[in-house]
Amino acid sequence: MLEKIKDKVIFETIKNKYTHSVPYHKYLGLKVSKFDFKSAEMTLSIKNELLGNVSRGFLHGGVTASVLDSIGGLVAIGDFISNNKDKSPDDLKNRINHMGTIDLRVDYLLPGEGKKFNANGSVIRAGKRVTVCRMEMHNDKNECIALGTGTYLWSK
């Protein structure tokens, strides 16, 4: 029971930092709607500052890539925590603070049309130093507008 409470506190802390402490996430308006050991979900609402095709009202492709990278990083963190429960909170925090993207591939499937978007991700493979994730982004019609594959490095 105590471990579940500890896990919940860790996930809530990271979820809040991702939403409220990362300036770029705040600018985009990203919200973490789900986060646990094996999955994560983020939501984004359209605003004028995020448009790439102003005449059609489509989301900028760079925003799509950023959202996919962010959800990939978040799901990698959840998986990393689940595989390193024996580590101290300070060690986990240090490793998470030094995690970074080393590769990101984005496949744009449809224009970023919609008012709300959600992204989710899953871990494909996790090693001691590298985690590979698969990410999807959907519009408010539940159409998959983009797929991503991200590789994240755990340093220190």
Image: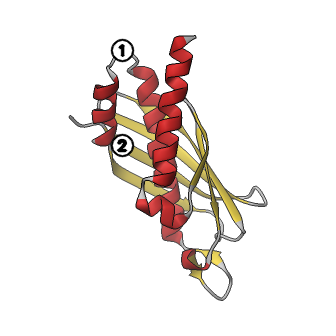
In the image: residue 12, left or right of residue 132 = right
Q: Is residue 127 above or below residue 150?
A: above
Residue assigned mark 1: 86
Q: Is residue 67 visible?
A: yes
The residue nearer to you, when weighing 58 against 124, is 58
For the C terminus, the quadrant is top left
The residue nearer to you, when weighing 102 against 91, is 91
Of all residues, the one furthest to the bottom in this rendering is 55
Q: Residue at x 67, y 59 (%)?
A: 117
Q: Is residue 20 above or below residue 129?
A: below
Q: Position of residue 44 (x, y in %)?
A: 62, 60
Q: Position of residue 68 (x, y in %)?
A: 51, 54
Q: Is residue 33 above or below residue 4?
A: below
Please name which of the two marks, 2 or 1, marks the residue nearer to the observer. Answer: 1
Q: Residue at x 53, y 12 (%)?
A: 2
Q: Position of residue 16 (x, y in %)?
A: 51, 45
Q: Amino acid at mark 1?
A: Asp
How far apart marks 2 and 1 lie (CA) works out to 21 Å
Q: Residues within 10 Å of mark 1 (few under 14, many from 20)?
A: few
Number of marks drawn: 2
Location of residue 36 (image quadrant): top right
Residue assigned mark 2: 152
Of all residues, the one furthest to the right in this rendering is 141
Q: Residue at x 36, y 14 (%)?
A: 86
Q: Secondary structure at mark 1?
A: loop
Q: Amino acid at mark 2?
A: Tyr
Callouts 2 and 1 close, C-beta under 8 Å: no
Q: Earlier in the sequence, mark 2 or mark 1?
A: 1
For the N terminus, the quadrant is top right
Q: Residue at x 44, y 63 (%)?
A: 24
Q: Secondary structure at mark 2?
A: strand
Q: Position of residue 149 (x, y in %)?
A: 47, 48
